[in-house]
Image (cartoon, rainbow, N blue to C red):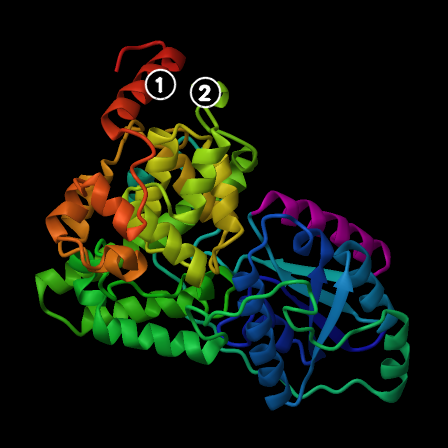
């Protein structure tokens, strides 16, 4: 057994503020990184080209950070249940370190790998890193996981938060024998997204890598975190952090992000600014609420949380779904949001709620269709956040007041009052009067002349129909 340690990167594509990597580096052993391109994930039909492109860019940046420290990041491709133990035994590693994950697939995979490694006499060290609080920490007085956000937030917010972790990555180069043995695995050069079967030609929402994420965080804290409570719902404004993809892949540590909010809070004496910072902190708590929900209730990945909604009579009209996907529903705010998603692989959070409500409550299409389409497009597509948001919108999830129906016209009037966002993404409406866009009262002749479709459904009719269907499965009048 050598003095070598492997650190297996997954959703922690950085060398800074990494709990497991810091522990590995503090052992005085040689430490190198490894990333496995998991074919089970890459061949899944819910993978977005933009997300893979961002992932590859982050890995390129991570490999540079390893080289800068005089170490190296290895790449393998295939089934990690086979590849990670094979790499560890081939290099005679004394231990493999990695960070735990909340997703059902990851947990099953990791248990199998840990069993194999231990049977081979290789130590396994794991830690929670992607959360400020491990799932076992935030529980009710009855020792049960939370299923409602507000009490979760109160408990979560009352706990002291860990500080960023300092990592000193030591130089490490494999010797000639180890390099020869690697041919048995084998390792690969970092592939491009196209090598992996994905093509994304448009610019990315966020530049890959830790440095870019750190700049984005700093700019957000300087620019708009204090106005976040006021601006976050307006898609035409740059009022959100833009860090969702970086957090999904762990390009920046969650402790680093939290520390930035504390620093921003300390630098202001304005109640309005403090409210904005607190609201963003609550969004970080929502992220952890959904992750801990997925950890404690893995069946969420397969269907509705609420029993009555598990057999909801969705209408599932394929033509209507296709129109929703293309952004051709005839509802301007819905179409703008879907076109934004299709073009840049990202959608403003307010708009995610609007289009999800429209798909489920107006088109009466199974939320899982929308959930999957989002995962096929989003650069920040994350199982727990995406699932939680869709179940919230579909009235099937963890919500004490589940029956919400968004009116797409009033949503547009409130959150895009000048129709700037709509005109940006639905350019055929640029010459149409704002009041007509926001009210939906665009004359049929005008729609025909500019090539914009009539509404595919009547919101008021569909709202009543959904309520009747909801009442039928709930057994109560709505």
Residue labelled with disc 2: 312
Q: Is residue 106 magenta?
A: yes
Q: Position of residue 55 (x, y in %)?
A: 57, 67
Q: Is residue 347 above or below residue 237?
A: above
Q: Quadrant of the C terminus?
A: top left
Q: Residue at x 59, y 67 (%)?
A: 20
Name the image quarter holding the N terminus: bottom right
Q: For the residues marked 2 and 1, what is the alpha-carbon distance in whole angstroms?
A: 8 Å
Q: Is residue 181 left or right of residue 99?
A: right
The numbered mark at residue 470 is: 1
Q: In the image, is 283 to the left or to the right of 382? A: left
Picture layout, residue 87 above or below residue 143? below
Name the residue rendered at 45%, 23% in the picture.
Answer: 315
Q: Residues within 10 Å of mark 1 (few under 14, many from 20)?
A: many
Q: Are marks 2 and 1 in contact (CB under 8 Å)?
A: yes
Query: Which type of secondary structure does the marked residue at label 2 adopt?
Result: loop
Q: Is residue 76 magenta?
A: no
The one nearer the camera, 185 or 150, is 185
- The front one of 92 and 232 is 232
């Amino acid at each position: 057994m050598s003095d070598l340690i492997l650190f297996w990167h997954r959703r922690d594509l950085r060398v800074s503020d990494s709990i497991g990597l810091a522990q590995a580096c503090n052992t005085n052993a040689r430490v190198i990184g490894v990333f496995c391109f998991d074919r089970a994930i890459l061949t899944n039909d819910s993978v977005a080209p933009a997300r893979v492109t961002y992932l590859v860019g982050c890995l390129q940046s991570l490999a540079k950070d390893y080289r800068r420290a005089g170490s190296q990041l290895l790449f393998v491709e295939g089934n990690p249940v086979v590849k990670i133990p094979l790499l560890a035994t081939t290099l005679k590693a004394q231990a493999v370190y990695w960070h735990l994950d909340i997703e059902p697939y990851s947990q099953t995979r990791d248990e199998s790998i840990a069993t194999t490694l231990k049977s081979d006499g290789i130590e396994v060290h794991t830690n929670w890193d992607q959360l400020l609080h491990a799932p076992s920490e935030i529980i009710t007085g009855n020792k049960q996981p939370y299923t409602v956000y507000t009490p979760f937030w109160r408990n979560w917010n009352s706990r002291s938060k860990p500080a960023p972790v300092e990592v000193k990555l030591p130089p490490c180069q494999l010797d000639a024998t180890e390099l020869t043995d690697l041919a048995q695995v084998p390792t690969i050069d970092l592939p491009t997204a196209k090598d992996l079967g994905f093509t994304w030609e448009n610019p990315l929402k966020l530049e890959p890598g830790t440095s870019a994420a750190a700049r984005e965080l700093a700019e957000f804290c300087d620019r708009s975190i204090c106005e976040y409570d006021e601006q976050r719902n307006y898609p035409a404004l740059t009022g959100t952090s833009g860090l969702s993809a970086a957090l999904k892949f762990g390009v920046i540590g969650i402790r680093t992000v939290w520390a930035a909010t504390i620093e921003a809070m300390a630098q202001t004496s304005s109640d309005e600014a403090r409210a904005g910072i607190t609201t963003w902190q609550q969004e970080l708590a929502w992220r952890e609420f959904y992750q801990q929900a997925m950890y404690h209730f893995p069946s969420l990945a397969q269907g509705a949380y609420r029993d009555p909604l598990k057999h909801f009579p969705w209408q599932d009209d394929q033509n209507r779904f296709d129109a929703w996907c293309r952004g051709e529903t005839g509802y301007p705010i819905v179409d703008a949001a879907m076109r934004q998603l299709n073009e840049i692989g990202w959608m403003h959070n307010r708009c995610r709620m609007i289009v999800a409500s429209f798909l489920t409550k107006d088109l009466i299409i199974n939320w899982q269709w929308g959930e999957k389409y989002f995962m096929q497009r989003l650069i920040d597509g994350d199982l727990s956040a995406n699932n939680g948001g869709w179940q919230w919108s579909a009235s099937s999830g963890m919500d004490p007041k589940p029956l919400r129906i968004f009116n797409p016209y009033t949503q547009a009037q409130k959150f895009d009052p000048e129709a700037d966002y709509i005109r940006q993404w639905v350019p055929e409406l640029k010459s149409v009067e704002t009041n007509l866009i926001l009210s939906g009262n665009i004359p049929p002749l005008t729609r025909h002349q500019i090539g914009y479709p009539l509404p595919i459904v009547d919101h008021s009719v569909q709202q009543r129909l959904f309520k009747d269907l909801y009442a039928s499965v709930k057994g109560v009048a709505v």
